[in-house]
Amino acid sequence: MSRSGADYLVEQTRHSLALLDRLDRDSARCPRLDELQHWQRCRLRETYDDLRRQDHYRPACVFFLEELYGGRDMRTRDSQLDRALPIMRRTLPDHLLHAVGEAMRLQAMSMDFDARMSRLIEGPLTQPEYARAYRRLAAWEGRREQIRLIGDLGELLHRTVKVPMIRRLVRWMRGPAHAAGFGKLQGFLDDGLSAFAEMGDDATQFVSTITRRETRALGLIEQGSEWPFREWIGQGPQR
């Protein structure tokens, strides 16, 4: 019998929190993690600037490329999620819980990947040094799985927002969630669903653009390119 979305969400939330705890304990081993993540966020913003400049894609860019990537206070939100799980089991549909679980999995996968890669950076963080550190890590299949997960999560959110009741329910939760100390979590859910609802059927094009470009860049790095993002950001990112 397959796991419920609720059970999957519990598993992924606990895994994300455990990873954050481990990184806190091992922070001395990853002294360049913050620098790498800042570089990566700049790289993502520039790579998808053409999408960000389109009004109906902009909220999804913020949610998918910044919120899920971990550029905000992940621990506060994830701790709220851990405490809110019993309530979410009772009030939210199982397929939405599964979608949130996939988001937690993507977040943890990205954080773990960056932590390991940050230990392998040997010089100033430029596009060529990023590509060299990537090849030193050589986690090719893990990165392909990460890109597949981006596509799967995007399609799952696209299907979820087609059920109007779900968005209304999450919006209705705003007041009670803030009163109960779950404001960051409610905002995360609301922002994600609203972003995908605003795109409508263009969500498929948005997600496919991300997976196509990331797959292209991965292939160039694997082939030895020093400038895998040149076609989108030149010799950037500009920080």
Image (cartoon, rainbow, N blue to C red):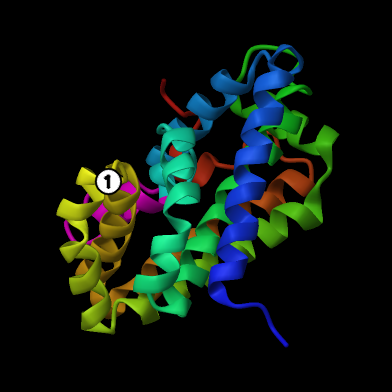
Q: Is residue 208 visible?
A: no
Q: Nearer the viewer, residue 95 or 210?
A: 95
Q: Residue 1 in the image: x percent, y percent?
A: 73, 88
Report the predominant secondary structure element of the magenta stretch.
helix
Q: Nearer the viewer, residue 150 or 237?
A: 150
Residue shown at 76%/29% (left/top)? 133
User: Is residue 237 toward the left or the right of residue 29 in the image?
Assistant: left
Q: Using the image, determine if residue 186 lies above or below residue 5.
A: above
Question: In the rendered structure, which segment of residues is drawn in magenta?
Answer: 47-64
Q: Quick one: label 1, few (<14), some, or many (20+) residues within 10 Å?
A: few
User: Is residue 98 toward the left or the right of residue 160 in the image?
Assistant: right
Residue shown at 52%/33% (left/top)? 40
The reply to whether the magenta stretch includes residue 129 is no
Q: Using the image, determine if residue 176 lies above or below residue 224.
A: below
According to the image, label 1 marks what residue? Answer: 180
Residue shown at 42%/35% (left/top)? 76
Secondary structure under tag 1 reads loop
Quarter of the figure that contains the C terminus: top left
User: Is residue 120 toward the left or the right of residue 20 in the image?
Assistant: right
Q: Residue 46 in the image: x percent, y percent?
A: 39, 39
The three-letter code of the residue at mark 1 reads: Ala
Q: Nearer the viewer, residue 65 or 157?
A: 157
Residue shown at 76%/22% (left/top)? 119
| Image quadrant where residue 163 sits | bottom left
Q: Using the image, determine if residue 123 lies above or below residue 129.
A: above
Q: Residue 145 in the image: x percent, y percent?
A: 70, 61
The reply to whether the magenta stretch includes residue 58 is yes
